[in-house]
Amino acid sequence: MASALMNKPTGKQEVQSVRQINKELILEVNNLEIFYGEKRAVNEISMVIEKNSITALIGPSGCGKSTFLRSINRMNDLIPGARAEGEIIYEDLNILSEQINVVALRKEIGMVFQKPNPFPKSIYENITHALKFAGIKKKSMLDEIVEESLQKAALWDEVKDRLHKSALSLSGGQQQRLCIARTIAMKPTIMLLDEPSSALDPISNAKVEELIIDLKKDYSIIIVTHNMQQASRISDKTAFFFKGDLIEYDATEKIFTNPSVKKTEEYISGRFG
Amino acid sequence: MNSKTADRIATGVFVAIAIIIISILVGLFSYILVNGLKHISWEFLTTPSSNIRAGGGIRDQLFNSFYILLITMIIAVPLGVGGGIYMAEYAKPGKVTDIIRSCIEVLASLPSIVIGMFGLLMFVNVTGWGYTILGGALALTVFNLPVIVRVSEDSIRAVPRDLKEASLALGITHWHTIKTVILPSAFPSILTGVILAAGRVFGEAAALLFTAGLSTPRLDYTNWNPFSDQSPLNIFRPAETLAVHIWSVNTQGLIPDVEEVSNGSAAVLVISVLLFNLLARWIGRLIHKKITATK
């Protein structure tokens, strides 16, 4: 599994971190710094992400949480001048290494964006698009995965009769669940959600939240959210970011009832942000 | 003057401008069609032109125009769209890209007669081909490339970044994303640009005078061997297009029915461009529907 992520085998061993092997962890972030040109957006953060849990990243706009999230599947590579230092360890490999094959990485670490962004293709093709590229060509196989992922995204009953209609004919909430479904179809290990329900109405939002909690048993989920209630409702652990620093990272219950840093408490109680 | 009056005046001004544009267009079209339609007949379209006698047609010129258009598009569209993809997706912002962009802009503003002279030098003399369809098509490629590059680049840049990110985030390579997500989304606007370029090719005369020439050999439409001199498909033969024909009968025509022939040709030219546009748009819409699953 891990070796598939390497561009090509190299003679030298990947730099091993000092961490102990812990089955419960899926990601380990060590002294991560992210820059946009000269500007530093994330300052030396270190944290571990647990497997099969929901980790919420909260904080005011511009605090670096989205930047951090996007560095986990190297989406920041698309931004000219963006670079990251430090390490993010996944499957014993540093994701930030030059030798990582980002295409293979993104198959394992999927992402759902703030604004629903289905392809202007049919619902069916939205899901098969990446599968076909990954080499699955058999119709029966594709049909099966489409149904399975739509089921998991709780969208199957609503769209099963119009799979070949344009995905743009769906409502915003349905589109977002379709985006989640197409990410599920790739069978990732980690799902990164960047404010996945902020553009949705309350009912769609509730459905997406329900879905996220349900997905926890199969995936490790990291979610950026501006919605405090959402973070407290669905996440197991919460990280509070402020001005590029990781201020506090703890069990969600602790963060929302009894935070140990004053800044966190001020933010959560709505005194700024 | 209060803002309400200003608003009303602005509305009036823009309506007036629209009316001016529409009346110029309608006037031009009706002038060309009224004068030209009466000279168009099946015979006019299917007989070869005559140099001295009255009653010549425009069969070969009409064919040449479409054939040069086809050859030009075969060369210019892949190059132009490829250039657009490079500029929008691969070129890193910096000096080199800026230089390329200025080159394209300068190329776009070259007068077509200058491109004709360049074509004469390059595609007629240096290559030693003489006046050929291929030479004409290459000159027209030079003429149209900047437009197609520009339009493709703009259309690709106009595709929402969300879509590109969505595809990349699913573990799809950059090229496959361009091919299956970005280009299909940009397709309608690229097509519009290509149709505009095609209209320019169809109506262009100056760039063809010295490259495709002013004459057409005796063509045998049953001869489909592209290497034969009499074959209409031969790309190494001289070919006078419809636009060039209009120019040449008016400036050096010996035929007594110059007016009839040029009016008829002008009408055929305008109608052809119109039909070509409609057809290209219709096909484009079908393709777009198919790839986006919209009904």
Image (cartoon, rainbow, N blue to C red):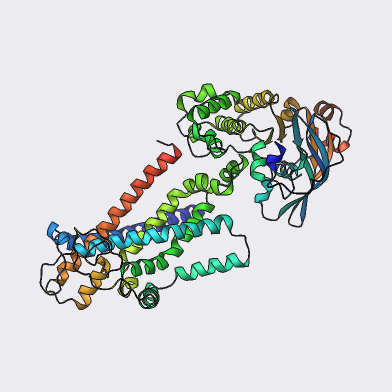
| Percent position of residue B80, x then y | 46, 60
Compare residues A216 and B179 and report the one nearer the observer: B179
Query: In the rendered image of this protein, does residue A258 appear above or below residue B274?
Result: above
User: Which of the image's four quarters has the C terminus of chain B?
Assistant: top left
In this view of the protein, can residue A271 be seen by the observer? no
Compare residues B119 and B237 and report the one nearer the observer: B237
Query: In the rendered image of this protein, does residue B1 appear above or below residue A245?
Result: below
Q: Is residue B126 left or right of residue B105?
A: left
| Percent position of residue A250, x then y | 84, 31
Query: In the rendered image of this protein, does residue B253 appear above or below residue A47?
Result: below
Q: Is residue B239 left or right of residue A248?
A: left
Query: In the rendered image of this protein, does residue A84 appear above or below residue A69?
Result: below
Number of callouts in the render?
0
| Percent position of residue B194, x then y | 40, 56
Residue at 76% over, 57% down: A38
Residue at 20% over, 73% down: B249
Residue at 73% over, 52% down: A83
Quarter assignment of residue B212: bottom left
In this view of the protein, can residue A182 be seen by the observer? yes
Residue at 29% over, 58% down: B273
| Percent position of residue B259, x then y | 16, 70
Outermost residue toward the front in this view? A11
Compare residues A180 and A176 and report the one nearer the observer: A180
